[in-house]
Image (cartoon, helix red, strand yellow):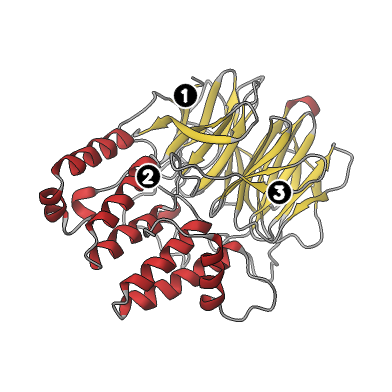
Amino acid sequence: MNALTFSISAVALMVAAALPAFAQSPSLLDTSRALREEMRAAAQIEDFETARRLNAAALSIQPGHSALLNNAVLLAGFAGDAQGQFEALEALAGAGLSYDLDGAVRNLAELEAADPQRVAALRAAFDANAAPVGEARLVASPPLGDALIEALAVDNETERLYLGGVAERRIYRVEPFAPTDFEVFAGEDEPIGSIFGLAADRRNGRLYAVEGVAPQTPLGDGEAPGTALLAFDLETGELIERYTIEGAVRMGDLTVRDGVVFVSDADAGRIYRLNGPRAELELYAEDDRFASLQGLAQARGALWVVDYALGLWRIDPVTRHAHLQPSPDSASLIGLDGLVADRLGRLFVVRNGAGPVGVFELMFDAQSQFVGMEPVLTGDDRIGEPTTLRVSDGRLFVNADAPWDQFPEDGTRPEGPRRTPQILAVPIP
């Protein structure tokens, strides 16, 4: 048995040994975290074989996880297992991930001496994974460096852009003829929370937004944190409705089609639905396995939701049961954020949790089973931490850089100026 394969029964045994006592059944992410803690403890006492087995068990829960694959490389090296190092490196390369071979592998010279052709093949694969793909046009860069822009929406009819701020608790509107200017659309006269998701509903003349609180949210004295789905008049910015639901923790993203809104709750492990403007917000799906739900999209007869820690979920429209898509060796589904579907039902996703970061198309077979990812836009110097993705008129619009690294939780400011939003548009291939 190598360090990258692990049977289900073996995983169960390792989990039972590694997990502390939980009040209820641990989630998949809790299980992986516990295994990683035990792995680190084993590595510290140089029990590298046990550490490798624990790391492999965590990888069986989070396949394609770049840090766990890197652990496999390091632990095999500590154990003196060159074959195990090669297998872990080839798994990283095969998953389409970028990797600093020279900087990360301390015994690379030994591997090159053992099998120079295999190392050369790895170099070529990692170079290919990191090669830039696609061309994008900058469509807006308003001076909103202090706002921490996370969310983006596009009005398909006017191509106006709507940007949601976390640190300034505002929604801004950018006209297509004035891409370096902005106006405050909402949040100036009537307070709103930090905005984590936006979606335009031209059919009903609404802009939907999800508000919540993060450590970077400026709260006034005595102001209580909360989360809600907001509906604004798409033209005037008037707040029409604030939809709340019991048990919500932090709504994180949303999608709207034909007047129906779906909302993910990243911290509660839930999905909500607003079945039309006059409906009430209802619980649509809830699953203890959900770890960190992000973007959503309706396509291929189902609702699809990305999970930052675990991958891609398909929600059955009849049973509302969640099915985690198997991750093939050729793709990593860890670290995904924004998700959108085009008119043909093709799904596009933002990845910012593993390199290369950028925009990818999710590929499916005839039975709608996930089979891989194809890069659409990567290697562009304007891409920092991409987040939201929207589609309009045959183009993908992406918020290419939400500068969370310049907004530390303790409120300190960076030495230099904060980066301004970069909204890019790339033709759908």
Residue 405 image-quadrant placement = bottom left
Q: Where residue 158 sits: x, y (%)?
A: 64, 20
- Where is 237 relative to 22, above or below? above
Describe the element under mark 1 as helix, strand or loop: strand
Q: Where residue 427 sits: x, y (%)?
A: 49, 20
Describe the element under mark 2 as helix, strand or loop: loop
Describe the element under mark 3 as helix, strand or loop: strand
Residue under label 2: 355
**Res. 152 visible in picture:** no
- Looking at the image, residue 185 sits to the left or right of residue 423; the answer is right
Residue type pointed to by label 3: Ala
Residue type pointed to by label 2: Gly
**Mark 2 or mark 1, which has the lower sequence index?**
2
Q: Where residue 142 sits: x, y (%)?
A: 47, 35
- Looking at the image, residue 371 sits to the left or right of residue 281; the answer is left
Residue under label 3: 322
| Other-residue count near label 1 (Cα within 10 Å), few / some / many at <14 / 14–19 / ≥20 | many
Location of the N terminus by quadrant is bottom left
- Looking at the image, residue 201 sits to the left or right of residue 296; the answer is right
Q: Mark 3 or mark 2: which is in front? A: 3
**Mark 3 or mark 2, which has the lower sequence index?**
3
Camera-side residue of 64 and 213: 64
Residue type pointed to by label 1: Val
Which residue does the image show at 74% across and 53% down from the upper left?
Answer: 228
- Looking at the image, residue 82 sits to the left or right of residue 338; the answer is left
Task: Give the Cα distance between marks 1 and 3.
Answer: 31 Å
Q: Mark 2 or mark 1: which is in front? A: 2
Task: Give the Cα distance between marks 2 and 1.
Answer: 19 Å
Residue under label 1: 426
- Give the label on residue 91, or none: none
